[in-house]
Image: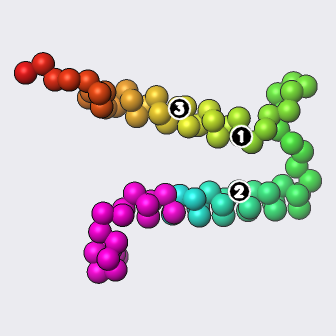
Amino acid sequence: MDIQIHHYGLAGREPLLLMLGASLLTLIGTRTYTRLARARGWRSGRVGDVHVHHLVIGIVLALVAACSRSRSSPASPGASSSR
């Protein structure tokens, strides 16, 4: 399936489309999980006696993604080349 985004006048807005798609996918996944958890009586996440809020998992995933992205980049964006 080939989507021609230039036909709709969206050229150069690919990052915005990706962000919209990711936001919608996250919303759908979160709502689905919440409804399943409430229907099945799942309890809140806990590590020992400490409640783990859903933001903790998101922050950890964001940090892991940023670290893996920075390790896979050949050079930092602000670094100057020595040619």
Q: Secondary structure at mark 2?
A: helix
For residue 52, above or below residue 28: above
Whether residue 25 is visible to the viewer of this picture, yes or no, is yes
**Image quarter of the C terminus:** top left
Q: Amino acid at mark 3?
A: Val
Q: Left or right: where does residue 16 sit relative to residue 73?
A: right
Q: Left or right: where does residue 79 sit relative to residue 8?
A: left
Tell whether position 4 is magenta: yes
Label 1 or label 2, whichever comes before in sequence order: 2
Q: Secondary structure at mark 3?
A: helix
Q: Which numbered dot is residue 46?
A: none
Q: Which numbered dot is residue 55?
A: 1
Residue stretch in magenta:
1-20
Q: Amino acid at mark 2?
A: Thr
Label 2 or label 3, whichever comes before in sequence order: 2
> Residue tagged by mark 3?
64
Q: Residue at x 64, y 40 (%)?
A: 58
Quarter assignment of residue 16: bottom left
User: Which of the two marks, 1 or 3, is nearer to us in this view?
Assistant: 1
x and y percentages locating residue 35 in the rendered image:
81, 62
